[in-house]
Image (cartoon, rainbow, N blue to C red):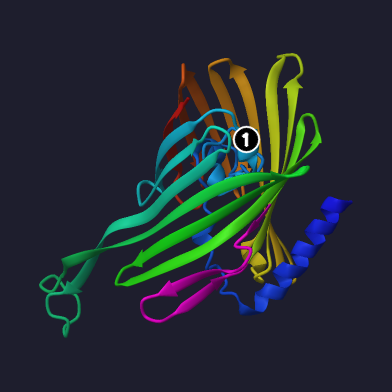
Amino acid sequence: MRTLKIVIIIMIILVAFELSATKYAGEIFQIGAGVRNFALGNCGVTDVNSSSLAFWNSALLTLVNENRFEIMHAEEYSGLLSYDTAAAIWGKTNKFSVVLTRIGVDDIPLTELEDPDEPISGSNRPYKYGSVNNSDIVVYFGFARKFGKYNIGFTPKLAYRNLADENGVGFGADISTFFLLKENTILAIKLRDFFSTQILWGNGTHEIVNPSLDAEVNHSFVLPVFKRNSSFYLRTEIFAEGRDTSSSIALGPVSLDYHVGYELNFHSAVDLYMGYDLTNITSGLKLKIQNWDVNYSFEYDNELENSHRVSVGFNL
């Protein structure tokens, strides 16, 4: 009942902030991080095994014992877009997490006609006179503390945006927690951009990122017959931006996007993943070689091209 009250209060806050926010301004903070989590349908708010907890849920750092390091490279839509991350979790008593992400479209050609005053033709063809890069760089810093029975995560974040000739900087923070409903069931809640993240552009434009709610439940169980450990993830993102048809479910100004993930410990050295991310099917696997983890994920997109992601991690 207490958890339900918290969710209701957060929903009221989201709707109240809708009037001042810029729709879709926070997309750069919602893409996801970690190959394993992409393969799980972009679930991760309850995933204590993720190396990117500063992005997903810093409160889970209270459950982490080892130090982790991971780098990821992704080619989206047949190489049109690149996405790279570096993540680390370290510390003795109190763990700290940092995640650095860069997503961009590089070397975009700029063209013009040889004679701009004449129509295009065989003798008046466009030529390349330069190129531009569009990229977003975000750094997340994750901290966690226990307050009595509660585990609270705090994630300040900084962003740098480069869109052709325009540059902008952003700053904000997320706050998160989790609840152990049963020994094998976790519910996690994250309030993203909880004090309205600000993005300031060099041309004087000011964007405000609306707070949004991220809720996820994770249930672990032993798969019958095969007797292998499994986990099921169900994640819901709740926005109050009037997204309408661009979301999975729209209820007036409130909209929901959902994600589903399944993980199977196929072998002591092999984990299999599959998921559903909004409209796309995802899959992947992890190979564990001593202290090293190699993850691969694949996302099938029936409208755009498919995406491949690879990461290498090390645990101490």
Badge 1, how many Cα within 10 Å: few under 14, some, many 20+? some
| Along the viewing direction, whichever of 260 and 9 lies nearer the viewer | 9
Circle 1 is placed at which residue position?
A: 48
Tell which residue pokes out farthest to the left in this image.
Answer: 123
Residue 270, x across and y down, in percent? 54, 20
| Along the viewing direction, whichever of 305 and 104 lies nearer the viewer | 104
Residue 310, x across and y down, in percent? 42, 35
Q: Which of the 4 quarters of the picture holds residue 23? A: bottom right
Please report the residue visible at 64 percent of the width from the left and 40 percent of the height from the top.
60
Magenta stretch in the rendered image: 190-210
184 is within the stretch colored magenta: no
Element on which disc 1 rests: loop
Q: Count the numbered circles shown.
A: 1
Tell which residue pokes out farthest to the bottom in this image.
Answer: 117
Please report the residue visible at 40 percent of the width from the left and 53 percent of the height from the top.
103
Asked if 7 appears above or below 297 in the picture, the reply is: below
Dot 1 amino acid type: Val
| Along the viewing direction, whichever of 113 and 162 lies nearer the viewer | 162
